[in-house]
Image: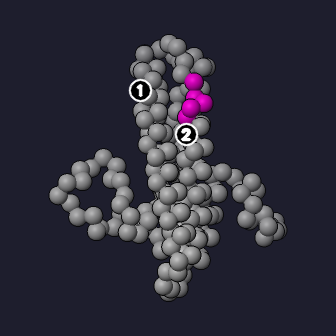
Amino acid sequence: MTMHLRSIFNPQSIPPSNFFLVLLLCLTATACGPSPKVSPGDQSLQQQAVAAHARADSLFGLTAALMEQLRTAASSIQTQGRELSNEEREFVEAVRNAEYRIAAWHDQHHGLPGIDHHHDGHDHSGHDHSHSHGNEMHLTPADFLALQEALEAEMAAILEQCRGVREVSH
């Protein structure tokens, strides 16, 4: 099986589940080596990456709120003590698929060096934010921008997927 270089960089030729893995591997490969001083152009790229990161986090917040409603409805359906209808099974499966996709996104979501980050579910008070969560990467500003924009686009697509899940009446 021969793969042309052009198809590697064409997101439509990569299955959605593998796109971010391929992107992450490409960006990681380009991150090796000493980091140079930050130029004004790189500062602009960093600012754009920070903005894309913030937008992705905002979309994640909207998605999380919607998912909480969908999870509650799916849980309610599943605890009725009867066999589910086809429509109910499809709804529960759609919620489960969205949850998996969010988890995969969250695993790929990388913190920006020097930028405050959210702490899913733990208290911020009395705690040192200088620690590492292990998902910070050391990439060029252009690579970080590309990664953050891809993560933002993926979360926007996940939010649309969640908005497309229709609750069923039971």
Q: Helix, strand, or loop for circle 1?
A: helix
User: Percent x, y for residue 23?
Assistant: 62, 64
Between the residue at mark 1 and the residue at mark 2, the CA separation in whole angstroms equals 17 Å
> In terms of depth relative to the viewer, which is nearer, 152 or 166?
152
Horizontal and vertical percent position of residue 86 = 61, 19
Q: Is residue 56 above or below residue 142?
A: above
Residue at position x 53%, y 70% in the image: 44
Q: Is residue 164 magenta?
A: yes
- Residue 135 visible? The answer is no
The answer, for residue 109, to whether it is visible in the render is: yes
Residue 7 sits in which quadrant?
Answer: bottom right
At 73% from the left edge and 65% from the top edge, which residue is drawn? 9
Magenta stretch, main secondary structure, is helix
Farthest residue in the front direction?
Answer: 40
Residue 68: x and y, percent?
42, 33
Q: Please give the range of residues in magenta.
A: 162-166
Identify the disc placed on residue 40: none
Q: Quadrant of residue 146?
A: bottom right
Q: Is residue 29 above or below residue 50?
A: below
